[in-house]
Amino acid sequence: MYMYITAGTYSYLKKLEEQHPSEKMMLMQNIRTVELWHETDKNTLFQSPRKYETIDTLGHFASEGFIACHYVPVRDENRPLFEYNFENKLSLIEKEEGLLAGRILRPLSSEVYIIMTMWQSERNYVRWEKSSTFTKFQIHHHLGNIFSNTPHTYTFTVSEEELEEDSFNPESS
């Protein structure tokens, strides 16, 4: 299975998603970007996507939820070690409250792996971050420095409506 990711405006990507209801797609957004993820074993519909192979999968995409994407840039020589340590890793969290889906994605055109988890709410994700199973996902604790750059996390919202900029600002009234 492959995952193809493209970015654009909410309205354009929403229309693209609606034009292909039989395809497995997920539209997600945050203050910085809007992305459409296309999971398929065929060719993608996107013109110039980021390309990944799915190496572990859990659950199904939902039309609403909270997404955490951990971007992990791994040196070429350390890719086998990283993949070995993440083999079947999603099975460790399958019973976490509020977890809807997870994917571990191998990059096909870069060095950045993505560990994506989808939750019913941000509250579920925050609870998991404080759990012992989350610690098992912190590879820098047990694999050493296998990175080509600093890993980072971005969060997204999956919603049927475009988020307004005010919704990201806790100071707004």
Image (tube, grey):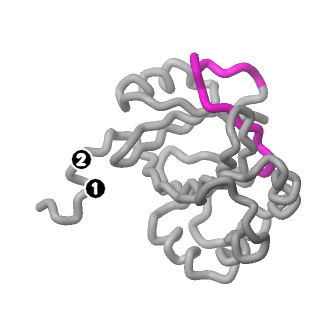
Name the residue at 72% across, 51% down.
104
User: Residue 75: which disc?
Assistant: none
Name the residue at 63% across, 27% down.
23
- Residue 12's spot in the image, x, y percent? 39, 23
Q: Is residue 170 left or right of residue 157?
A: left
Q: Is residue 80 left or right of residue 116?
A: right
Q: Regarding mark 1 in the picture, which secondary structure is present there?
A: helix
> For mark 1, does the 10 Å Cα neighbourhood hold few (<14), some (14 to 19), or many (20 or more) residues?
few
The C terminus sits in image quarter: bottom left
Q: Is residue 87 above or below residue 18?
A: below
User: Residue 165: which disc?
Assistant: 2
Q: Is residue 66 left or right of residue 103?
A: left
- Residue 166's spot in the image, x, y percent? 20, 52
> For mark 2, does the 10 Å Cα neighbourhood hold few (<14), some (14 to 19), or many (20 or more) residues?
few
Circle 1/circle 2 CB separation < 8 Å: yes
Q: Is residue 140 left or right of residue 46?
A: right
- Residue 108's spot in the image, x, y percent? 74, 34
The N terminus sits in image quarter: top right
Is residue 44 highlighted in magenta? Answer: yes
Residue at the disc numbered 1: 168
Q: Amino acid at mark 1?
A: Phe
Is residue 71 highlighted in magenta? Answer: no
Name the residue at 50% across, 26% down.
17
Q: Is residue 6 above or below residue 70?
A: above
Name the residue at 37% across, 44% down.
32
Q: Where does the magenta region start and end?
A: 42-56
Q: Nearer the viewer, residue 83 or 10?
A: 83
